Each structure stands twice: as C-alpha cells, then as structure tokens.
Image (cartoon, coloured by chain):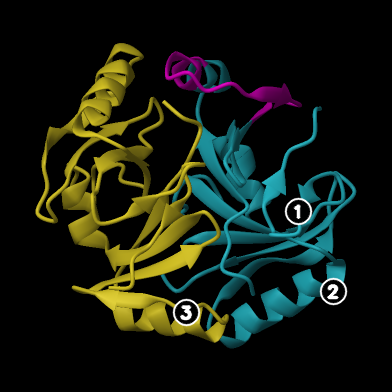
Chain colours: A cyan, B yellow
Amino acid sequence: MDQRISLVTLGVGDLARARTFYAGLGWHGQEVEETVFFQAGAMALVLWDRGKLAADSGLTATGSGFDGVTLAQNVRSEGEVDEIVAAARDAGATVTRAPAPTFYGGYAGVFLDPDGHAWEIAFNPGFTLDDDGALVLPEF
Amino acid sequence: MDQRISLVTLGVGDLARARTFYAGLGWHGQEVEETVFFQAGAMALVLWDRGKLAADSGLTATGSGFDGVTLAQNVRSEGEVDEIVAAARDAGATVTRAPAPTFYGGYAGVFLDPDGHAWEIAFNPGFTLDDDGALVLPEF
C-alpha cells in the first residue's frame, strides 16, 4: 500500500451550509450529485451527507463509532483494491464493505483500522492518478 | 486560505497497536515523542493519543462530538494563522483554541467547521512547506 491519502471525506448534516462555510474561506469546489469536491493539492477534500457517508463506509451514522470522516486511497486496478483490503484484514482491520463494484463504475472496499478510522480503497476510472500518485479531479 | 490539507491526525487508543497496523500495510513512519509521522505524498498522516489530540484541539475525548480526527493546514507565518482563524470565525466556525504559541516553537489555532470537524491552522518552522505548499517532514 502506498503511503498516500487520495481523498478526505467529511460527513455533513447540511451540504449547503458546509459548502457556504468553505466558500467563505475561499475554497472553490464542484458539486456533483449532492457531493462537493475540492481539489486540495495532490488530493481532494469532499463534503457528503453524513448518513450516506456512514452507509457507504459500511457503518451507521450513530452508535457505530463512525468518525464522521472517511479517508480514501485511490489505486490503479481492481486487483490492487483486493490486495490492500486483504492485507488490511490480515493486519487486524475490520472489513466493513467487501471489495465490489461501485455505483460510479469503479470498484472499492472499506476497512476500519484498529481505532475505527474508516479507509476506502478505490479504483475509480473517472479520477486521474498522475505518475506520482496524486489525484486530479475531472471537470465534472 | 489555500485549498490544502497538510496533515491528517488520527486519534488512537494504543499507539504501538496503531503503528504496527500501518506497518503491516507497508507504511514507514518516524516516532517522535509518542507521535508517529508518515510522509504521505505532499502531506503527512499522524498517529497520536486520542485524548491528547482532543485536548490539543480544544475538545474533550468523549462527549464533545470529537471526530477522533483533526485536519491541519500548515502556513508560512503567524500572521497567516491569525487571518485564517479570524476568517473561519467570521464564516461561522467555533474557535476551540485561539491562535497562540505552541510547545514545539510554532504558533497555531484550532476551529470546528459547522459539522464539528476540527482544523488546526499552524505555523511550524520545523516542517518545510515547498513552493507548491506541499509539506515535507524533517528527519527527526
């Protein structure tokens, strides 16, 4: 597994309020299907409904210990997703979403580290990974 | 405020367990004063005691809504810390730690976004920011 975070997704209770807040700090994002993506250097910050993020992470929004934050690493193939999730399981992670095709045409799985921090490992053909592994958002 | 995350710090209950887990995934870090730093592309992932992280973020570890995760943006001057924290307050953030000198010889403040996600804005003369704003950890 590369030492890289591709996306940090923050669960939010009110997407418009959250987007307005970050706009007030000068952040410019793109909103797609009730999700806001901000290019942030070599990675992206994402705002998404907290309940949807929890469910997507294989958790419930409350009572599961869900952080309200999910980290993601994007990789270059479905096989790499399988390998990393298997290695995480072997290292003691709890797999909350077994690797499988995603609604956006990719392939991803989610695990929790020993402290319950959620990591999605994703192959997303719609997002570019440059030679250095930096994530470059498309123009949606 | 630049669109950039310099560090993602994960609160952990057992630092050795967490470090061993990430080592099992192939991550190589440096441990300094009971904190583990991993260079991760243009940023860093950090493991730190959850209670200390909460306190450093101006929160308590339980009952405060603390995520268990704190994002940080490192900037180039103390004045920039003041400006960003003031802008965040104006945009509706809750400032949980007013900008002030830090134990490591820097200067930092912390705010919560409208969903309670903690951001530290820090000037840390011990960490390099390159021309693109990427964070480069020192050899400790």
Q: Which residue bears the numbered disc 3?
A: B28
SS at badge 2: helix
Element assignment for label 3: loop
| Residue hosting label 1 | A130
Residue A132 is a magenta residue: no
Labels 2 and 3 within one chain: no
Region rendered in magenta = A20-37
Mark count: 3
Kind of residue at badge 2: Gly
* Residue A112 position (above or below residue B20): above
Which residue occupies 31% across, 42% down?
B65
10 Å neighbourhood of mark 3: few (<14), some, or many (≥20)? some
Indicate the amino acid at tag 1.
Answer: Asp
State the image quarter where residue B51 is shown: bottom left
Residue A118 position in % (x across, y down) = 54, 59
Please name the residue shown 47% across and 79% down the image: B28
* Mark closer to the observer (2, 3): 3
Q: Quadrant of the C terminus of chain B?
A: bottom left
Rendered image: mark on residue A79: 2
Which three-letter amino acid code belongs to the residue tagged 3? His
Query: On the picture, is A85 further left or further right than B94?
Result: right
Q: Does B51 sit left or right of A60 as displayed?
A: left
